[in-house]
Image (cartoon, helix red, strand yellow):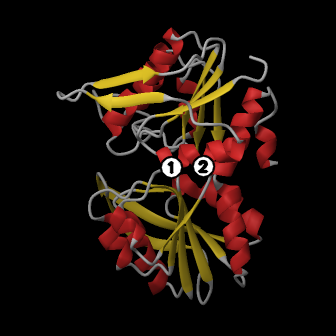
Amino acid sequence: MANRIKIFTGNANQELAKSICRHLDEPLGNAVVREFSDGEILVEIAENIRGADTFVIQPTCTPGNKNLMELLILIDALKRASALRITAVIPYFGYARQDRKVTPRAPISAKLVADLITVAGANRVLSMDLHAGQIQGFFDIPVDNLFAAPVLLSYLKDLQLEEPVVVSPDAGGVERARAFAKRLGAGLAIIDKRRTGPNVSEVMHIIGDVMDKPVIVVDDMIDTGGTLVQGLDALKKAGAESILACATHPVFSGSAIERLSKSLADKIIITDTIPLKPEAQQCDKIVQLSVAKLLAEAIRRIHNDESVSSLFV
């Protein structure tokens, strides 16, 4: 394995892959990833990778099923080309919200996807801000779960907000919000809500003091934006002075962009784990930060058998 490192990507987020390669001062691997006329995916590794330490950068964002299949076929192609080690770099891990049985006879799709990646031939996985930490246990191979917090916190600290309050959008996100609040020296509040259906929730009330204070809502992803917008309305009614929304993954499905552009958020801060849609790029409220440097450093440490967890000490 010595000094041979090869980085490949599918079509999910090529700009992020290229940016990671620039930080590593490594060329992007030569792989052809295209579709047959009937939609089947064809992958060709167009260079020698025998005995190389290979990394496949591929978030499973929209279109999720297509990008997942690209990832699996890329891994299989690398395995059959005699790569020494294959690391699946999945900045956004799709199907992560299906991590348990919430109704009778429901699948645990996150576990199924983990099995597929393992069977395809991946030796380890590198992801970022998994929706549920227990997903790491779904794999029978090593998993490194990175956090976008250092990138987001650096931006927030530069704003020099006075007496900010970090807000968790629900009870499940309290741990994440508490970690942000500790790093920022900020207060903590929670939005108490009751979900009435898929992608639908009803905000109940705010636990904590946000009156006349700048608030920062922290979550791992923004999907349809409906839950977030309701939370922002509740925070404004509770007297918040200004509102920032932070999330690692800009899923932005359905009419999310329209909702967010009309929302009470002053800024919506996200990262480039998922490429922004054209309409999102035109939204003045959205600020996109890059996690390419963080991912590149993690890849370098994995290649050199160094500690990854020390990135977040």
Q: How many marks?
A: 2
Residue identifier under label 2: 19
Q: Residues within 10 Å of mark 1 (few under 14, many from 20)?
A: some
Which residue is more in the foreground, 55 or 219? 55
Residue at which label 1 appears: 15
Q: CA distance from mark 1 to mark 2?
A: 6 Å
- Residue 151 sits above or below residue 243 on the image: above
- Are the residues at dot 1 and dot 2 in contact (C-beta closer than 8 Å)? yes
- Disc 2 on helix, strand or loop? helix
Left or right of 278 on screen, residue 232: right
Residue 80: image location, x then y, percent: 49, 9
| Foreground of the two, 201 or 216 | 216
Instruction: Please rate how many residues cluster around mark 2, counting C-alpha atoms within 10 Å: few if below 14, some from 14 to 19, many from 20.
Output: some
Compared to residue 40, the image places residue 234 above or below, namely below
Q: Residue at x 17, y 27 (%)?
A: 38
Is residue 226 in sight in this rendering? no
